Image: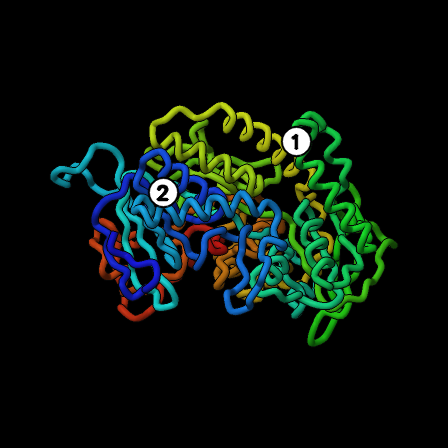
C-alpha cells in the first residue's frame, strides 16, 4: 500500500488490492483486523482518528502527559492486547494501518472489465486524509464496516446554552482532554451510559447532584433470563451503583430535564417527573442549580456508508435503525460485512466478539462456537437495554413552540409541527424541504430523531452518496462511472452530504 499513516500529504491510490479493508478502528474494527491478520489475510485498516480505539477507548492527547490512561476506561486490557497485536501485524506487513483517513464513500469496481482480476466482489474506498483533506483510495476484495455510533439527543428548552453537552461528549472531554464540562454537572437522559458518565465525572472531581433517568429500571423485569445470562453486566451495574452511593449522587428514575436556565451559560435545570409515556407530570417540577448538563438518550448506529451501498436495515427495540446481518456478520450486499454498533447498540465487549466473528467469516473459516454463544448472550442483553430505555412518545410535550430543534438551521418545534399539521408533510424528507431541519452542518445528527417524532413519522433509513464533507476537486478527479454524484463541480469548493434524501445520519469519528 502506498499511503503513509504518518504523513497525510503522501496519500494517494493504493492500487494493489487487499483481501480485506476495515473501516473504523474502534473495538469491532480493531478486533476484526487483528483476527483477520491472525488468520492469514492481508488487511488495510482505515480510521478517522489519530490512534486506534475509537470513541470508547479514547486516549488523552500525548501532550497532556497522562500516566495512567487505563484508569479512565473499563475493560482496558482487552484493548491493550489487541493494540499490541495491531502493532506486531503492522511491523510484519500483514496490516496496513491508515489513521486520519475518513472514508466518504465505498463503490463497487467493475472486475469483469479488469484483466486478471480475481472473481467476486471488489471495492474502492475513497477517503479524505487529515486536516489537509488529501485524497486517498484503497482497493479491496471485501469490506468490513465498523463505523460505530453517535449520541441520540432529544431537545428541550435551553439545550443550546453553553454548558449543555452530550453525555458521551462529557466522557470524551474527560478521556481525551482530562477536563470536566463544569464543576457541578447534572447527568440526564436515558440509558446505562449515564451511570458510567456520572461515576467518571465524580471520580475526576466534579460534583454531580443528580442522575436524571427518564426510564424506569422496572423495564428490565421482562428480561430476567437475559440478565441472568450476563452476570458480569449485572456486576458492572452494581459497581456503577456503588459509585453513585459513594459520591452521594441522587438517582431520579422516571424524571427528565425539561428546561435549562441561564444567560451566558447554563445556571440551573428544571427536572420533572414523567408518566409512563414520558409526559411531564404537572406539579412535579423542581429546579437544580448546576453549571453544566451532560445529556444523552442512548446511541444511534452510524450507517451512511452501509445504506449508501444499499445494505438492508431493521428497526431495533429502541426504535433506532440498524443493519440486517446474518450469522457471519454479512450484510445483504455481497462482499460487505459489518460488526459492532452498526448492527444494533450493544457495547464494546459485544463489538469485540462480532469483529472476530466477521474475520472468521471473511477468511472462510468456521466461526468458533464460543464467539457465537457470547454474541447471542450479549445481543439478548443489548435488546433488553434497548427496550427498557426506549424513549416514550410523550417527551415532545416538554418542547415549547419556540424551542430550537434543528440547532444548525435554528428551526423551532412550532415550524416542524406546522409542516406536519398544516402543510401536508408525511415524511421526514418533506419536513426537511419545508423547514430546512437537518440541512445544517451536522446533517440531522442532533435533530433527526426529534424531527421524526414531532412530524409523527418513523425515521427512515438514510441513504446518501457521501458520508462527510468532501472537496469538489476530489469528485472532479473521479471517473464518471465512479462518481457518487454523477457530475463534478468547481474544484476548490466543498461538497457537503447535505442534500441527500432526508436528514442525515452523519457521524462521529470512525
Question: In the drawing, does residue 311 fall left or right of residue 447?
Answer: left
Which mark is in front, 2 or 1? 1
Q: Are marks 2 and 1 in contact (CB under 8 Å)?
A: no
Please say if 15 is above or below 376: below
Q: Position of residue 467 (x, y in %)?
A: 40, 54
Rendered image quadrant of residue 161:
bottom right
Q: What residue lies at 79% left-to-right and 44% top-to-bottom?
A: 275
Q: Which residue is mark 2?
A: 309
Q: Position of residue 192 (x, y in %)?
A: 68, 45
Q: Position of residue 245 (x, y in %)?
A: 82, 50
Tell me if residue 464 can be seen: yes
- Furthest-right residue in this view: 283
Q: What residue lies at 35% left-to-right and 68% top-to-bottom?
A: 132
The coloring applied to the image is rainbow
Disc 2 or 1, which lies upstream in sequence?
A: 1
Q: Which residue is mark 1?
A: 230
Question: In the drawing, does residue 120 fall left or right of residue 391?
Answer: left
- In-front residue for pair 66/302: 66
> SS at mark 1?
loop
Spatial separation of the CA atoms under disc 2 and disc 1: 35 Å
Rendered image quadrant of residue 65:
bottom right
Tell me if residue 156 can be seen: no
Amino acid at each position: 500500500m502506498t499511503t503513509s499513516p504518518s504523513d497525510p500529504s503522501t496519500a494517494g491510490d493504493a492500487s494493489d488490492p487487499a483481501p480485506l479493508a476495515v473501516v473504523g478502528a474502534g473495538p469491532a474494527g480493531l478486533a476484526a483486523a487483528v483476527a483477520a491478520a491472525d488468520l492469514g489475510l492481508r488487511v488495510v485498516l482505515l480510521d478517522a482518528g489519530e490512534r486506534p480505539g475509537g470513541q470508547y477507548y479514547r486516549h488523552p492527547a500525548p501532550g497532556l502527559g497522562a500516566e495512567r490512561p487505563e484508569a479512565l476506561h473499563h475493560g482496558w486490557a482487552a484493548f491493550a492486547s489487541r493494540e499490541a497485536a495491531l502493532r506486531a501485524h503492522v511491523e510484519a506487513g500483514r496490516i496496513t494501518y491508515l489513521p486520519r483517513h475518513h472514508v466518504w464513500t465505498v463503490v463497487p469496481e467493475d472486475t469483469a472489465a479488469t484483466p486478471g482480476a480475481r472473481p467476486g466482489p471488489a471495492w474502492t474506498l475513497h477517503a479524505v486524509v487529515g486536516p489537509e483533506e488529501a485524497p486517498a483510495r484503497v482497493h479491496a476484495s471485501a469490506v468490513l464496516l465498523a463505523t460505530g455510533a453517535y449520541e441520540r439527543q432529544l431537545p428541550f428548552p435551553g439545550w443550546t446554552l453553553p454548558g449543555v453537552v452530550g453525555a458521551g461528549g462529557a466522557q470524551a472531554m474527560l478521556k481525551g482532554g482530562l477536563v470536566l464540562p463544569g464543576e457541578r454537572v447534572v447527568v440526564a437522559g436515558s440509558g446505562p451510559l449515564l451511570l458510567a458518565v456520572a461515576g467518571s465525572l465524580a471520580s475526576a472531581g466534579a460534583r454531580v447532584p443528580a442522575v436524571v433517568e427518564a426510564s424506569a429500571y422496572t423495564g428490565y423485569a421482562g428480561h430476567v433470563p437475559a440478565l441472568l445470562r450476563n452476570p458480569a453486566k449485572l456486576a458492572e451495574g452494581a459497581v456503577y451503583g456503588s459509585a453513585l452511593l459513594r459520591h452521594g449522587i441522587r438517582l431520579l428514575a422516571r424524571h427528565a430535564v425539561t428546561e435549562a436556565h441561564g444567560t451566558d451559560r447554563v445556571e440551573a435545570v428544571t427536572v420533572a417527573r414523567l408518566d409512563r409515556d414520558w409526559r411531564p407530570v404537572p406539579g412535579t417540577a423542581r429546579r437544580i442549580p448546576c453549571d453544566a448538563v451532560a445529556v444523552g438518550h442512548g446511541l444511534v448506529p452510524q450507517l451512511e456508508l452501509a445504506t449508501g451501498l444499499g445494505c438492508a436495515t431493521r428497526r431495533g427495540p429502541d426504535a433506532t435503525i440498524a443493519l440486517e446481518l446474518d450469522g457471519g456478520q454479512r450484510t445483504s450486499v455481497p462482499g460487505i460485512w459489518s460488526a459492532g454498533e452498526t448492527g444494533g447498540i450493544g457495547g464494546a465487549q459485544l463489538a469485540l466478539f462480532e469483529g472476530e466473528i466477521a474475520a472468521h467469516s471473511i477468511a472462510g473459516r468456521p466461526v468458533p462456537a464460543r464467539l457465537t454463544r457470547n454474541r447471542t448472550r450479549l445481543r439478548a442483553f443489548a435488546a433488553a437495554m434497548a427496550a427498557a430505555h426506549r424513549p416514550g412518545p410523550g417527551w415532545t410535550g416538554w418542547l415549547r413552540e419556540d424551542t430550537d430543534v434543528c440547532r444548525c438551521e435554528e428551526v423551532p418545534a412550532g415550524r416542524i409541527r406546522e409542516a406536519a399539521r398544516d402543510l401536508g408533510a408525511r415524511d421526514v424528507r418533506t419536513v426537511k424541504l419545508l423547514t430546512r431541519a437537518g440541512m445544517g452542518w451536522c446533517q440531522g445528527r442532533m435533530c433527526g430523531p426529534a424531527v421524526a417524532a414531532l412530524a409523527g413519522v418513523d425515521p427512515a433509513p438514510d441513504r446518501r452518496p457521501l458520508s462527510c464533507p468532501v472537496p469538489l476537486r476530489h469528485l472532479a478527479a473521479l471517473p464518471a462511472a465512479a462518481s457518487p454524484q454523477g457530475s463534478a463541480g468547481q474544484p476548490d469548493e466543498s461538497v457537503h452530504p447535505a442534500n441527500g434524501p432526508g436528514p442525515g445520519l452523519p457521524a462521529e469519528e470512525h
